[in-house]
Image (spheres, helix red, strand yellow):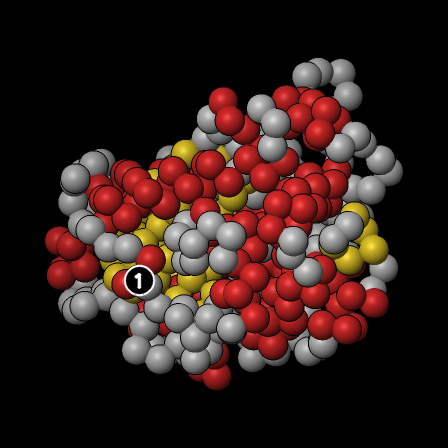
Amino acid sequence: MGRKVNVIGVGMVKFQKPGASEGYEVMARGAITEALKDAGVAFDELEQAYAGYVFGDSTCGQRAVYSVGKTGIPVINVNNNCSTGSTALYLARQAVEGGLAECVLAVGFEQMQKGALNSAWSDRTNPLDQHVNVMNEQQGVNQAPFAAQMFGGAGREYRWRHDTRRETFAKVAEKARKHAARNPFALFREVLSVEQILASDEVFDPLTRFQCCPPTCGAAAAILCSDEFAKRKGLTNPVWIAAQTMTTDFPSSFETSMIKMVGYDMAKQAAAQLYEKAGLGPEDVQVVELHDCFTANELLTYEAIGLCPEGGAEQFIWDEDNTYGGDVVVNPSGGLLSKGHPLGATGLAQCTELVWHLRGTAGERQVPEAKVALQHNLGLGGACVMTMYRRG
């Protein structure tokens, strides 16, 4: 292990529907400015910047950073599908931990278009071709959005294996809406019942429309620094990264399981490595932000990262051990399902939310006595980034 890495500043902008947001550089400027203000750091104290986005031309990261300042620092553009924001955070953490920099920026942003995600290139190998092959062999391919077919298929496989009710998946979305109602940064703040969620249009069984994350525009940022830098700035007891891991696909992702194809084993291994590095387990965690791009993935992730035993997710959900008053509060922000999912920004929005809880500044959605926080961010193609945060 290298040096201790602190998260001394975070910021984000309110998430918006495509077409309703400002430009990516304007959103990024808002998030970076808030993070700098939160940290009490001037832009010219930053030594490096890692900028994450999925959709956009090359060097959008520079354009986003230039909207705040031009000091000639290295700006590294990052693209790792839906785990892009956490990958930027991962690289920033490595720079500080390894002694290469004292104070570093990680920023993520996305200016998305309406509709389901599609590949931008048709004249080269699709990076998800092996994943699609698994889906084609296991369940075939239809006209539904590909991501919904993948995660919906994993949910269907889980249902067949454990005789899980369709209402259980909808219960996850109901929780997301309840949590988002308290979050002024969230896209969808209207509370919905299980019945309303099930009555929405079916996308791919067991998923209905309200069980799928929406295309979203937004930005979030974090300032990371060494202990020495924090002390020079007079900062006491900052939130710090206790451990962080990243995994990519294993051979099992491309065998005979939709569940494993959508990242179950990546998450399981990332969690195991994280707990070993941190010297903490899921039982020590009070608050979690995890990658609920679809309700099926939240359910699967409970088991993959050890919040409940394998096969125990349905009871975990109906016992409400995933919300306030239960074992752990999962996605107090409303998660991707309700807060929204601007791909490049999501990982840093998760970071921002968890830092607020560990500081005790999360307002109406504050998790009581939060001391340890856990983050899970997944990108098909694939990468899973997990981070453990502590304070005190």
Residue situated in front as seen by the camera: 9 or 323: 323
Decide if residue 236 is on the left or right side of residue 275.
left
Picture layout, residue 263 above or below residue 334: above
Q: Nearer the viewer, residue 119 or 377?
A: 377
Residue 348 can be seen in this image = no
Q: What x and y, as percent, mark residue 71?
A: 37, 43
- 248 horizontally vs 137: left or right: left
Seen from the viewer's position, the closer of residues 60 and 263 is 263
Instruction: Answer yes or no: is residue 160 visible.
Output: yes
Q: Position of residue 169 (x, y in %)?
A: 66, 60
The picture quadrant where one finds residue 98 is top left
Image quarter hosting the C terminus: bottom left
Total labels drawn: 1
Residue under the point 66% across and 42% down: 157
- Label 1 sits on a secondary structure element that is helix
Reply above or below: 241 against 126.
below
The percent position of residue 339, horizontal first and vertical second, equals: 60, 65
State the image coordinates of residue 197 (x, y, percent, origin top left): 75, 68
Residue drawn at (27%, 69%) of the image? 371
What is the quadrant of the N terminus in the image?
top left
- Residue position marked by numbered label 1 in the rendering: 283
